[in-house]
Amino acid sequence: MRFDVLTLFPDLFRPHLEQGITRRAFESHQVDVHLWPLRDFADDNYRRVDDRPYGGGPGMVLLAEPLQRALAAVRDARGGTPGPLVHFTPTGRRLDQALVREFAEGSGAILLCGRYEGIDQRFLDRHVDLEVSLGDFVLSGGELAALALLDAVARLQPGVLGDAQSHAQDSFSDGLLDCPHYSRPERLGSGADAQPVPAVLLSGHHAEIARWRRERALELTARRRPDLIAAARAAGALGAADERFLASLGL
Ligand code: SAM
C-alpha cells in the first residue's frame, strides 16, 4: 500500500520511519511512504505557502493553491493507485482501531497535515474525502496524527511484529482492553512490600492462564470503558462465562 504525505515538515517523519519494529514495514515498502514537502509547491522565491486569514484574527492559513499543485503532483505519481485524501484535524472523526484496520486492509491514502490555524476551507471542501482527529486536544500540526496512523497501520502488516499473535491480543482487537503483563523477577522487591507475579501465570495451565487473562481484560474494560463492554454485548462477543464473571463483580 502507498501513503503520500503532504507536510511542511517532512523531517519529522524520517526518524520514526527508520526505527522500531514498524521500520520493517516501511523499509520493505509493504507500507510505502512518500513525503511531499509543501514548500516545493510554492510559486514565489520565499517558498511561501501561508498567508493571513480573511476577516482578521490571529495566525496564518495554509494556502489553497500550493496544495492544489501538490495534490495534482501526488495523484500523478500514484498513477492508477486509488487513495482517499485524509485531512488531520481536531474537528474530524476520532481515530480508532476499526479505522486503522480499514486503512491496513486498503491500498493506502494521501495524508494532509495542517499547520497554523489550518487550511483554506475551499481546498478542503473540494478535495478532502475523510477528516481524522487524534483526540480532543489541539496539536501544532497534523504530522503526529499522520505518524500515529502510519505506525498503527504498519504494525498490522503481516510479518511486521515478531509474533503474529501479538496484535490479536492488543487492546481493541477483540473489543476489550488488554490484560496486564508480567515478566522477571517472580517477586519484585522484598519483605512486606514485595510484589509477586500472579500465581496462575507460573502454573503452566494454559486454559487457566487464558481464562485469567480474559477475566482481567473483562474487568479492566468494564471498570474503565463500559462503552466497550456494551458494544461487545451488542456484537454478541461475550460468552456465558464472561457474563457470569462480570455478574460476579457486579459489573
Ligand atoms: N484552528 C484549529 C482548530 O481549532 O480546530 C487547530 C489548528 S492546529 C494549531 C494546526 C494543525 O494541527 C491542524 O490544521 C491539524 O492538521 C493539526 N491538528 C491539531 N490537533 C489535531 C488533532 N487533535 N488531530 C489531528 N490533527 C490535529
Image: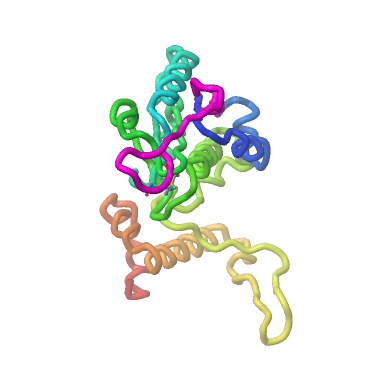
Magenta stretch containing residue 46, yes or no?
yes
Q: Is residue 153 visible?
A: yes
Is residue 137 toward the left or the right of residue 159 in the image? left
Taking the spot 64% from the left edge, 35% from the top edge, the residue there is: 14
Looking at the rendered structure, the number of numbered marks drawn on it comes to 0
Q: Nearer the viewer, residue 118 or 88?
A: 118
Q: Nearer the viewer, residue 30 or 88?
A: 88
Is residue 22 toward the left or the right of residue 156 in the image? right
Q: How is the image coloured?
A: rainbow
The extreme bottom residue here reads 192
Q: Quadrant of residue 20?
A: top right
Location of the C terminus by quadrant is bottom left
User: Residue 212: x and y, percent?
Assistant: 50, 64
Taking the spot 34% from the left edge, 68% from the top edge, the residue there is: 244
Q: Quadrant of residue 110?
A: top left
The extreme left residue here reads 234
Whether residue 187 is situated above or below residue 106 in the rendered picture? below
Question: Which SS does the magenta portion mostly show?
Answer: loop
Is residue 83 toward the left or the right of residue 201 in the image? left
Q: Nearer the viewer, residue 247 or 98?
A: 98
User: Residue 182: x and y, percent?
Assistant: 63, 64
**In the rendered structure, which segment of residues is drawn in magenta?**
31-60
User: Residue 159: x and y, percent?
Assistant: 60, 34
Taking the spot 43% from the left edge, 45% from the top edge, the residue there is: 59
User: Residue 88: x and y, percent?
Assistant: 41, 40
Q: Nearer the viewer, residue 238 or 176?
A: 176
Q: Is residue 239 visible?
A: no
Whether residue 44 is situated above or below residue 22 in the rendered picture? above
